Amino acid sequence: MATPRPRFTSAFHDERIAAALGIALGATFSICFATGVWSHLQQNPPSWFDPIARPAGLYRVTQGVHVATGIATIPLLLAKLWVVYPKLFRPVLSSIGVFLERVSLIPLVGGGIFLLFTGLANINLWYPWPFNFRSAHYWVAWITIGALVVHVGAKLTTTRAAFSRRVPLDPAVAPASSMDRRRFLALVAGASGMLTVFTIGQTVWPLRQLALLAPRRPDTGPQGFPVNRSAVAAGVVDVARDPDYRLVVEGRVRHPLSLSLAQVRAMPLHDAVLPIACVEGWSASRSWRGVRVRDLLERAGASPDARVRVHSLQQRLAYASSDLDPAQARDPDTLLALEVAGEPLHLDHGYPVRLIGPNRPGVQQTKWVTRLVVS
Amino acid sequence: MTAPVDERPGRGFWVALTLGTPIMVYGAYGLVHQTGWPRSFAVARWLGAGLLLHDLVLVPIVVALVWAVGRTAPRWLCLPVRAGVLGTALIVAVAWPALRGYGNRPDNPTVHPLDYGSAVLTVLAILWAIVAAWSAVAWMRQPRPRPNA
């Protein structure tokens, strides 16, 4: 005798609502995936990929979109899971196709929840798990997007039917009226919009006063913008203030350099307005003044196609160095900055010298720079 | 009587399965290759826990809230109040790390720089002002019995 299935009387467990939310989720997950892979390529460039220096604010846009879209996806995903919840009680073993389709929901739904939760925790710099966020978030994104491809194939027919109003009615679910559908979708869109309005000010400067739910404010911090790793956390408080500080340029150069801070300051200084754009989604544009990296390379006699590894005074922790490919190293706006907004850099912003360049993730704008190794 | 739904996936599913499976395998391989088996199992545990938490805790709570509002509020008020209650839960959940100070660093006050208690209350006040306005419109639009002539 067949086990009776629970009856769901809410009009919102509806195929057309599910189809509309599915399309929206397909779009938002695809945007997050594309911008996430882009960020990963920027941070860990493989041999076939040279990060580009222009447009200068590209990373700011892609990462801002990544985080904002992720936050807007939270209500979409919860609503979609609510709408399709009755399907959890359907038989799984009616055919091999049904079984495989249901199994593919585990990485899809589990992965989706995992990505949104870990992403939300990461923008708060909160890591309550025993694994590396960056690796887990990146590879689970691949698993989830693979499961999304499978799901799109499985639901293509249903979605088409839903929009052509030829939906097979499920006897376990009451259908929604068009008014119910519009109301429900408007509510979900409103929830996504509300979260976006109250968080996106962490990267969209004119909306910063509205960033009431954002973990960062782009106008708050020493010299008016945030810090991810302080000098105390990096363990560089004393060494960064050392009067014997030297900036060294070495490696594949004809004239290795070892310059005091006064000698660096005596070099021609240039201004550039560039954003600090963090992987956590906040960004702030500032006016920087410093020495062009290409001027230093020319003075040291490096070749025009030189690659440069920029080393920080910090000895431990990740991101103690970053790489500049030839295009970035030669860009006129790639500076070893000494000042921001007309003041010497605050210790937490990288005093005495920090790297700032166009279209670079914040973690690669190396602070407390002491050594450039040319290859 | 309504015919039972034919849930057997069509040809599109098999094509998508052929395309999607290698992508999933690539992701799983990358995870294990880069983080090792113990860390990968930890990721799998967190992934599974998220699923169970949603299906066994979150959904029943939402069902209970929706049901409770339906039992206590008049019909015209149900939808606005349900939207308000669920919206409140969503806002508090998104702001939870900031409210609890998860991720705060004593050496870095730029993480969670606001008074998030006040910030969340401000957002909730805006949400409930919208709910109140919506409720007033719903009350005015509700059908009323016509008085006898």
Image (spheres, helix red, strand yellow):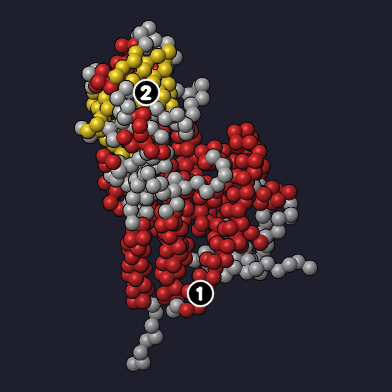
Question: Is residue A307 left or right of A342 when viewed as pictured?
Answer: right
Element at label 1: helix
Residue beneath disc 1: B68
In this view, the residue farthest toward the left is A342
Residue A29 on image: x %, y %: 50, 45
Q: Amino acid at mark 1?
A: Ala
Q: Amino acid at mark 2?
A: Thr
At 61% from the left and 41% from the top, the residue drawn is B39
Where A5 falls versus A248 (above or below)? below
Residue A136 on image: x %, y %: 56, 40
Q: Chain of mark 1?
A: B
Q: Are the two marked residues, 1 and 2, in contact with CB atoms closer than 8 angstroms?
A: no
Quarter holding the C terminus of chain A?
Answer: top left
In this view, the residue farthest toward the right is A1
Where B140 falls versus A71 (above or below)? below
Marks 1, 2: nearer the viewer: 2
At 36% from the left and 76% from the top, the residue drawn is B139
Q: Nearer the viewer, residue A273 or A35?
A: A273
Question: Is residue A225 left or right of B22 when viewed as pictured?
Answer: left
At 55% from the left and 57% from the top, the residue drawn is A81
Residue beneath disc 2: A370
Q: Nearer the viewer, residue A220 or A18?
A: A220
At 44% from the left and 73% from the top, the residue drawn is B78
Q: Is residue B20 visible?
A: no
